[in-house]
Each structure stands twice: as structure tokens, then as C-alpha cells.
Image (cartoon, rainbow, N blue to C red):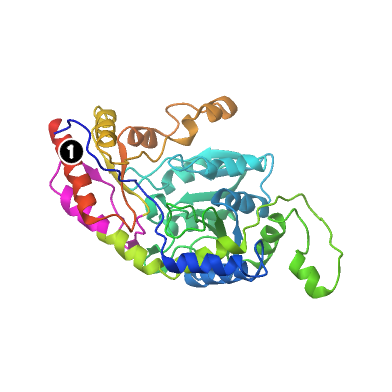
Amino acid sequence: MSGGPVSRSIPYGRQCIDEDDVRAVAQALRSDFLTTGPRVAEFEAAVAGRVGAAHGVAVNSGTAALHCVMHALGVGPGDEVIVPPITFAATANSVLYCGGTPVFADVDPDTLCIDPADVERKLSPRTRAVVGVDYAGQPCDWDALRTLAGNRGLALVADACHALGAQDKGRPVGSLADLSVFSFHPVKHVTTGEGGMVVTSDAALAGRMRRFRSHGIDADAGQREKGGTWRYAMIELGFNYRITDIQCALGLSQFARLDAFLARRREIAAAYDADFAALPGVRPLAVRPGAGHAWHLYVVRVDPARREAIFGALRRAGVGVNVHYIPVHLHPFYRKTLGTAEGLCPVAEAAYETLLSLPMWPGLAEDDRRFVAGRLAALAGEGA
């Protein structure tokens, strides 16, 4: 069943662009604003309002959004920030950008979200913040993390780049932490091409992030024009992390279809679940009771002795299977810089050897989805 190549090309994720999106971008191109303009504020308000936050700060990537968060919190040399290892490197990198030290706490073996018990073990007098990653689109145990952070006066940050539209016990992701970060990369729930946003209900933090995204300057061009002045002051060292009106026009158009995108992702996940329910060689991740999963990724675990063979056979069959993620602390940079090594997060390390991400995006055709499931089932059965 794992024979020659099949003439298919099924990506693990991709954007879904329609004519409304094209029209929205074209209208922005014909407007007076190409870079920061009214569509940026409109997009910020739409996302923040949806998730129950008072403020949104849009930037040019999810990574920039994470950097804004660490800067706004005042993370610096001598500070520690607890992060999980099963995430994209940007989560931990953002701490290093500010001179802080990421401390890796292991993950829950069933969900691969950060384990609150290990977070508690990794706390120290130098801990400044705790970052939870809503891995694959499932919310972390935010109640437990909130208790840990609140009892010690720590900032609580949600790397929710996988989880726009997710909920925990009916509460939207974006309202569960002090600051929450979303990504609008093409494989995410809605896209701006590249882009990201931080949402928060803390006006002071939002103000500092807005300043940081524009060189540390206290007033942008629009504010100066409204005030009838050319004067501005750079009051701290910032970056050019601004997002454009063109991107936010696309984001607003996409955002109008978020519920439809979420519904289709949940349909695909339910169908995969049914296909693998009685298949011992393929084990989907668990979903916590009360978690409203957003299904950015559909992740399964397979026999670690056969993961590489299964991965290769699926790729040869035209299935864009992927692996999310290599534990961050095992990357060469982290080994060299922080001295991290195997054994630091044993649950994450063992899980990584088993992981496969299957195609999951709203435009995935049912025939292609069935092909993916059937090919994986056949490959897993070969090793039974």
C-alpha cells in the first residue's frame, strides 16, 4: 500500500482567497492609504471586539507581536520567562530579543500544551512572565496558569497564533491572558499575507506596543496630521513593525468568514477522528473537556520507529504532511546559547518523535481528506 507516487498535491495548510478578498485589496490599492491608515484601526477593533479585549495592536508578523509583548512587559537581562518547548522558535526567541532568558517547562502528554505542574516547578525569583501556547488550536489550561501567575504577580501571555476563534469553557481565547498574540500567516485561520496582532485590556501596555512598532516614536504620521504639527519625539528604541492598510483590507475581508472557516476545520477534524477511532497505530491528540478547539493543525501520533518511513511515504504520495515541532530547546542555537539538551523536557522530547500534522485547511476537499486518512491508515497498518 506504500508503493509508487500518486499524482496529487495536498498541502498541510494554505490560504483560502475569494473574489471578496481580491476586491477588498483592490479598493485599498485605489485609496489614499497603502501603509498605516484607517483599515489598520478597523482590523484591530474587529479582532479585539471578537475576542473580548479592549485593545488590538496590529503588526507585520506574529513574531513581531511576541517581541512587542516582551518589550511592553519590560523583560530584560536577568529576567526569566517560562515557555513550552513544543512551539515555533519565535515564542522563545522573543524573550531573547529583549535580553531575557526563556525557561522551558514541559508539556501535558495528552494535549502537548504547557503543563502547569511543570511551570510551577520551573518558577524562580527571576520569573517575569509565563507564556502558554494554544498548541494546534486547543486552549491551554488557562485557569491553572492564571492561578499560578496571579498568586505570584507574574504576567500571563497567550501565544494564541494557532487559536483564533477557540474558546475555553465558553470564554474566547484572547480574553484569558493579560496579553494574547495572533498570527495571520497564510496557513492560519485568516490571513493578511504576513501579519500579527496583540490583544489586551491594558491600555498602558497597548500604548507601549503601538509606540514600539513604530520606532519608539510617540506620535505616528496620522496623529501629527490631525494635530497640525510636524513635531514628534522618539522616546525609546523601537522597530518598524507596522502593518499596511493593504494587508488589513485583506484581513478584514477574511475575518468576515472566520466562523465559516472554523466550522469547516471542525468538520475535517471530526471526520479524521472518526477515521482513526479504531486504528491503534494512529492516535490523535486529546481534547480537554470544555475546550473549543480551533483546529489550526490536526496532529496525530504514530509509532516512533516508523514515523520517518510514514512521513516519507505520505510525501511521495503527494500528501503535504508535516511535523510540528522540533522541541525548541533542541535546536543548535539553544544548545549553544543556553546549554539546553535532551532530558530537559522528556515528555515533549518523546512526543516529538511520534508527531505528524495532517492536511487541515478550510479548502481541503473531502476526496483529498479521505485519501490522506486512507493512506495513513494503510501505512500504519503495515507496521501492526
Q: Amino acid at mark 1?
A: Gly
Query: For the magenta stretch, what is the residue range?
Result: 268-295
Residue at 65%, 56% (x, y): give it.
242
Q: Report the number of discs.
A: 1
Residue 199: x and y, percent?
Answer: 56, 63
Q: Nearer the viewer, residue 108 or 320?
A: 320
Residue 277 relative to residue 222: left or right: left
Residue 116: x and y, percent?
Answer: 43, 48
Residue 290: x and y, percent?
Answer: 32, 63
Residue 186 visible within the image: yes
Answer above or below: position of 124 versus 370.
above
Using the rendered view, name the quadrant where residue 355 is placed: top left
Crowd rating for badge 1 (residues with CA inside 10 Å; few <14, some 14–19, many 20+)? some
The quadrant of the picture occupied by the C terminus is top left
The residue wearing badge 1 is 281
Residue 294 is one of the magenta-drawn residues: yes
Q: Dot 1 lies on which element? A: loop
Residue 35 relative to residue 10: left or right: right
Q: Nearer the viewer, residue 248 or 59?
A: 248
Residue 53: x and y, percent?
Answer: 54, 69
Residue 125 visible within the image: no
Using the rendered view, name the quadrant where residue 383 is placed: top left
Residue at 81%, 55% (x, y): give it.
235
